[in-house]
Amino acid sequence: MARSGVQFEDVQRAIDDLLARGDSPSVQKVREVLGTGSFTTISDHLREWRTRREENRDVPPPRGMPGALQELAEGLWHKAQESANETLAHYREEADRRVEEAETRVAEAQRRAEDALQRESALAAHLASTEQRLEARGTTLARTEAQREQLEEKFRRLETRHAELEGLLTRIRGEMAQQALDHQQVVEAMQARQRERLAREEQRHESAEARLMGLLDEARQQRQAAEKSAAEREKQSGVRLERLEQQFMEARGKLAEEEKRHREVDWARRQAETLADTRQHEQALLQARIDEQKHLLEEQARRLRDLEQQLHRCLWQTPPAREKAEEKGGDVDDDNQKGPATAEPSETT
């Protein structure tokens, strides 16, 4: 019986709000909308709502209800019918709660990472123009590292979820094995009792054969009923096992996708590091070329100074030649004045 804290009308209004938003009604979501109530009470009301909904499936929808919403509600109802399993209600509720908590932590971590990236961008804006390209690469590497850490955190959570699913699968298999063992023991005990009764009746009197046959038929029917019940339980357990294995395969697929994304991010990080190393190598080569050009300029300047000194010496060595020319004749003076200026540099060259 449901407790009087949360009424059926409250649960129905919460379900209507969820359907209006396009969400599938569940115990956890209804409790979030109401903000109160126990899982048992909400589950009972939700089961009653589904029962009424099944009874009124043939009733045409109200005129004001959109067709798309009606189709969505019917699809959700069929989906809920297929996935309903009362024996796993507690596990599903616990799993939903853990997933929502994990998503909340992921959103908080992403928000913090975005805030950190914004602060890093604001600080990077004050650097000099000559370091902007390298700083952009550093920002990209930092973002890639943050994404890698987030992916690693998701990978760890998926591993935890994977371990939980494996534990649940192992526990269910153990329960199935125990049920099969119990069934076998019950059948064996019934057969042993029937054999004892049959032996006693045979020893007591041979004329009771008809009665013994009746008892044997009754025992056979009981055994068939027990076997049928055990087969039904085994079938239900098999369905539960198949669903859990499907969830396990989905989790494994998500894990493989996260590993692929992790490898892509790691490859991008290595590419960025290689590009940064290449840029640094190019800058080192450019600096070496600049130093070499400076050395060549200094060498040319030195050689130019040497040539100027030689020219200066040549100009100061011309007076003796001028005096000899004056002794031979005054006409030679003009030629000697021009001669050293042109001849001496050619010898130097």
Image (tube, rainbow, N blue to C red):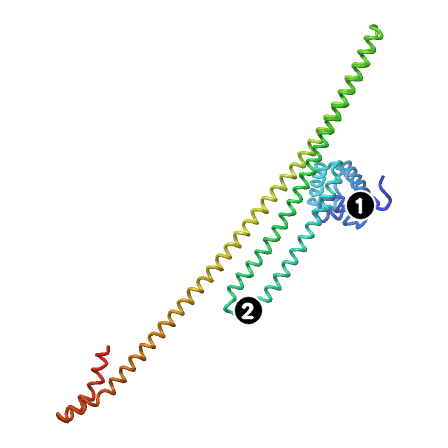
Residue in the image at 58% along x and 56% along y: 145
Instruction: Kindly report the distance in space between the C-alpha atoms of the residues bearing marks 2 and 1.
Output: 59 Å
Give the mark count: 2
Nearest to the eye among marks 2 and 1: give it. 2
The three-letter code of the residue at mark 1 reads Val
Residue furthest to the left in view is 328
Q: Quadrant of residue 346?
A: bottom left
Read off the residue under disc 1.
11
Residue furthest to the top in view is 207
Q: Quadrant of the N terminus?
A: top right
Residue in the image at 66% along x and 45% along y: 160
Residue in the image at 69% along x and 31% along y: 238
Helix, strand or loop status at disc 2? loop
Q: Which mark is residue 76?
A: none
Q: Who is closer to the viewer here, 86 or 319?
A: 319
Q: Who is closer to the viewer here, 76 or 230?
A: 230
Q: Is residue 304 above or below residue 232?
A: below
Earlier sequence position, callout 2 versus callout 1: 1
Residue 188 image position (x, y, % from top left) = 76, 20
Q: Quadrant of residue 178?
A: top right
10 Å neighbourhood of mark 1: few (<14), some, or many (≥20)? many
Residue 164 image position (x, y, % from top left) = 68, 41
Q: Quadrant of residue 282?
A: bottom left
The three-letter code of the residue at mark 2 reads Leu
Read off the residue under disc 2.
127
